[in-house]
Amino acid sequence: MQTINDVVIRLDATVQQCIHTKNRAGYFAALYKRMTAAVAEGIQQHAFEDGPRMERLDVIFAKRYTDAYDAYYSGKPCSSSWKLVFDCCNNNNLTVIQHLLLGINTHINLDLAVAAALTCPGNSINALQHDFNKINDVINSLVDDVQESLCRVWWPMRMITKIANGRQEAVLNFSIDKARDASWASALLLAGMTAEQQQVYVQQMDIVVQRLGTGIESPGILSHYLLQTIRAIEYDDVAQVINIIDTTVA
């Protein structure tokens, strides 16, 4: 993948594959495709301070996800945090929002920090902060949009409108805003490290991010019962849910 359009094409292929195989990995893939398309539109409309730099970041960012996806589904090793995300796709007891947040957790807390440091090594990382925050704003708005889309076609979703709200503590105790801040702090550290130091630090990050993912998978007794109630009345057609996330716009 060399351009952001290449990324959109690749993500669409992943979405279509997941629809065909009824793989819940398609939930996050569909959300991510929408996010990438929104970033591409933002670049075209000069919404970022440096459009070419943003495109480079987006390609590096996406490649971390697609590499992990390809490795996992070809039986090769991938990061512990992505392995958890894909393992959870076989868990029929998790809600759609849990699957989405599992992917968001790893992609923001691990991949975005690494991609930012690779795009802007050394002191150049400081100039990226505004556009870095813009990407997270896109993610936040699209999660809200996907929630609203699901609400419109599936009424019980109204019960969990606060689960993915990045501005407050919620049922899953996951905040996109807090993830963004932690990711930026890691990006600053990584940008000043040697390649060897980065490798060690990324391995440590992976462990922490996996633990955060485990908290999304198993958020506690009270949240568990609420989520199980929601799951009991969710759509069971995986392909239909992927299509909703992929195509329905609020």
Image (cartoon, rainbow, N blue to C red):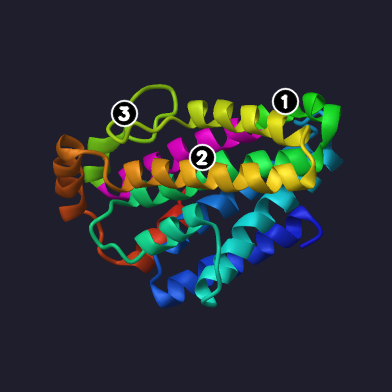
Residue at image position (74%, 52%) is: 59
Say which element carries label 2.
Answer: helix
Q: Position of residue 200 (x, y in %)?
A: 65, 46
Q: Which type of secondary structure does the marked residue at label 1 adopt?
A: helix
Distance (Cα) linking label 3 and label 1: 26 Å
Give the quarter of the figure containing the C terminus.
top left
Left or right, residue 93 beside residue 131: left
| Magenta highlight range | 135-154
Q: Which mark is residue 170?
A: 3
Q: Is residue 24 above or below residue 44?
A: below
Q: Residues within 10 Å of mark 2 (few under 14, many from 20)?
A: many
Task: Give the left or right position of residue 240, taking residue 42 as reference.
Answer: left
Q: Amino acid at mark 1?
A: Gln
Disc 2 residue type (three-letter): Leu
**Residue 55 coordinates in the image, percent (x, y):** 79, 46
Residue 11 appears in the picture as rendered: no
| Mark 2 or 3, closer to the camera | 3
- Does the magenta stretch mainly form a helix, a strand or a loop? helix
Magenta highlight on residue 216: no
* CB within 8 Å, label 3 to label 1: no
Please tell me the numbered disc located at residue 129.
1
Disc 3 residue type (three-letter): Ala
Which marked residue is nearer to the observer: mark 2 or mark 1? 1
Determine the residue positioned at 63% across, 27% down.
185
Q: Tell me where residue 206 appears, x and y as whole percent.
A: 53, 47
The disc, 3 or 1, on the residue closer to the chain's N-terminal end is 1
Upstream in sequence: badge 2 or badge 1: 1
Residue 142 got which mark? 2
